Image (spheres, rainbow, N blue to C red):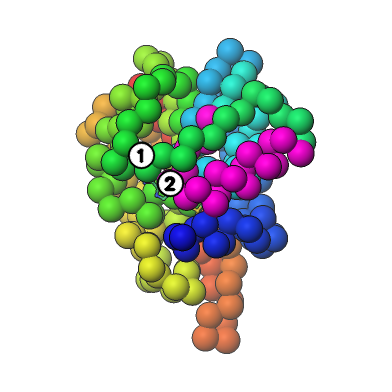
Amino acid sequence: MSRFDIAALTWDEKPMRVNIAKSVAENIKKHIPLNKDMKLLDFGCGTGLLTFFLIDKVGRAVGVDSSQGMCEVFLKKAKENNIDNVEVLNVDLEKQDIDQKFDVIVSSMALHHVKDTQNILKKFYSLLNDGGYIAIADLVKEDGTFHDDNEGVEHFGFDLEELKSLFEKVGFKDVQYDIAYTVVKERDGQNREYPIFLMVGRK
Ligand SMILES: C[S@@+](CC[C@H](N)C(=O)[O-])C[C@H]1O[C@@H](n2cnc3c(N)ncnc32)[C@H](O)[C@@H]1O
């Protein structure tokens, strides 16, 4: 069992996670004209927090997560809420491929778990239909104090100009970013701010 399989059972109990997903979803709706003809992919969907905040704006959504435990919770929530236009794939997108195309790819707080950022961005590009949108949210560069345990954390956030260049290098156009939410955590007796960006682009 992976760390995320165990975390899945209580994932939604932390208000911080729900608040991040909610703010990221609101920000995505501001930047991308979502509509019912669109098929959406949520990379590293976890329990589907972001997917379920966006599901009524698109035609169909596919969550992808390498943790079986997360996928099980995702499915349970879809069933309990009678949401039938979603599916979840238990896939490690760094190692496996999906034989589908999407109109929009979203992701929240998953990119920092992927070692090779350029490679996964290339994969996102190949999974999008022409004109499709990408919207990735994650931590702005931090000093490694955001997580209580850095196991599985491949990047302490991202330098936004460097990431923007990488988006452009793999082919994304109209790349822009915004701060979608700021997490405040107590560290060494002081409140520390950890901004979360949303970077959007188009194929
Ligand atoms: C911090 S959680 C975020 C979950 C969810 N997006 C949220 O905001 O609540 C990161 C998720 O990314 C998934 N993940 C990490 N690497 C992955 C990969 N290569 N392929 C698919 N999922 C991955 C993990 O299993 C985990 O569920």
Residue 152 image position (x, y, % from top left): 37, 62
Residue 72 image position (x, y, % from top left): 59, 45
Residue 14 image position (x, y, % from top left): 66, 62
For the residues labelled 2 and 1, say whether their Cβ atoms are less than 8 Å apart.
yes
Q: Residue furthest right?
A: 81
Question: Where is 93 relative to 11, above or below?
Answer: above
* Circle 2 residue: 66
Looking at the image, tell me whether mark 2 or mark 1 is earlier in sequence order.
2
**Depth order, front residue of 46/6:** 6
Does the residue tagged 1 have its C-beta within 8 Å of any atom of ligand 1? yes
Question: Where is 55 relative to 3, above or below?
Answer: above
Would you identify the image quadrant in which residue 59 lies?
A: top right
Mark 1 residue type: Leu
**Callout 2: few (<14), some (14-19), or many (20+) C-alpha neighbours within 10 Å?**
many
Would you identify the image quadrant in which residue 172 lies?
A: top left
**Depth order, front residue of 155/72:** 72
* Circle 1 residue: 93
Does the residue tagged 2 have its C-beta within 8 Å of any atom of ligand 1? yes
Q: Name which residue lies at 59% across and 68% down.
A: 184
Q: Residue furthest bottom?
A: 189
Residue 181 image position (x, y, % from top left): 58, 53
Q: Name which residue lies at 72% across and 35% down.
A: 79
Mark 2 residue type: Ser
Let me know if residue 77 is in the magenta part: yes
Let me know if residue 114 is in the magenta part: no
Cα distance in 3D space between marks 2 and 1? 7 Å
